[in-house]
């Protein structure tokens, strides 16, 4: 079964992001606004219990932290994705790296860049138009990350929470 690990911003931030995602994100209906901590990976049934124990340990050793989304950016030409950038990504990078240490690092063509997707799988011209409009907007959205989630993917490609892991206070 396919799994992923993600953190969700607070509802007020999700509501703001969803006002854009409805128009620009092909995955809008498949998962709420989130910050990916580990991309999709496979876990067999007999590996699940160990994975949960490992994630519980990571959560206990990680303190809650605040994030501020401050501007619109994009991954073009690597990907036609527009996102909200995080002005203090260090806690997310450290959490991502810790998860990678425990689960084994995956070879990727790019470095991990925590972000909150606004739009993806856009035509090139649309990406440039939308980015041009959105970068003129002022963004100052703060959220506290108090938990992360082990997610599983359904056959229709939607994601559901398998288990939630609370960070230490």
Image: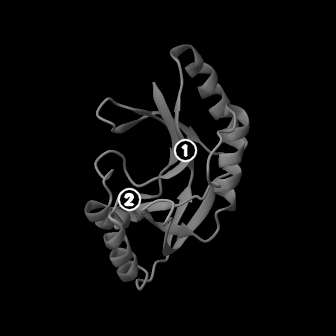
Q: Which percent across, then down, holds residue 114?
A: 58, 58
As displayed, is residue 25 above or below residue 46? below
- Nearest the eye: 47 or 140: 47
Residue 72 in view (yes/no)? yes
Q: Is residue 114 left or right of residue 34?
A: right
Q: Nearer the viewer, mark 2 or mark 1?
A: 2
- Extreme bottom residue here? 136
Q: Which percent across, then down, holds residue 137?
A: 40, 83
Q: Residue 148's mark?
A: 1
Residue at the image point whose x is 73% and y is 42% from the top: 61
Q: Measure the C-alpha gap from mark 2 to mark 1.
A: 23 Å
Residue 60 in view (yes/no)? no
Residue under label 2: 120
As displayed, is residue 77 above or below residue 91? below
Q: Residue 104's mark?
A: none
Residue at the image point whose x is 31% and y is 71% from the top: 126
- Nearest the eye: 112 or 67: 112
Q: Which percent across, then down, holds residue 155?
A: 32, 29
What quarter of the picture does the N terminus occupy? top left
As displayed, is residue 61 above or below residue 90? above
């Amino acid at each position: 079964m396919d799994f992923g690990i993600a953190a969700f911003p607070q509802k007020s931030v999700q509501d703001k992001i969803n006002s854009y995602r409805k128009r620009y994100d092909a995955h809008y209906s498949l998962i709420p606004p989130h910050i990916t901590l580990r991309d999709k990976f496979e876990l067999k049934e007999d590996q699940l219990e160990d994975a949960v124990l490992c994630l519980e340990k990571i959560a206990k050793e990680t303190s809650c932290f605040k994030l501020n989304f401050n501007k619109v950016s994009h991954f073009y030409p690597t990907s036609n994705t527009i996102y909200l950038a995080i002005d203090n990504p260090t806690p997310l990078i450290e959490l991502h790296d810790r998860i990678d240490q425990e689960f084994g690092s995956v070879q990727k063509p790019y470095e991990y860049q925590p972000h909150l997707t606004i739009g993806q799988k856009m035509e090139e011209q649309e990406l440039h138009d939308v980015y041009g409009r959105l970068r003129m907007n002022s963004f100052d959205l703060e959220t506290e990350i108090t938990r992360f989630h082990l997610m599983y993917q359904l056959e229709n490609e939607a994601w559901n929470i398998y288990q939630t892991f609370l960070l230490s206070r």
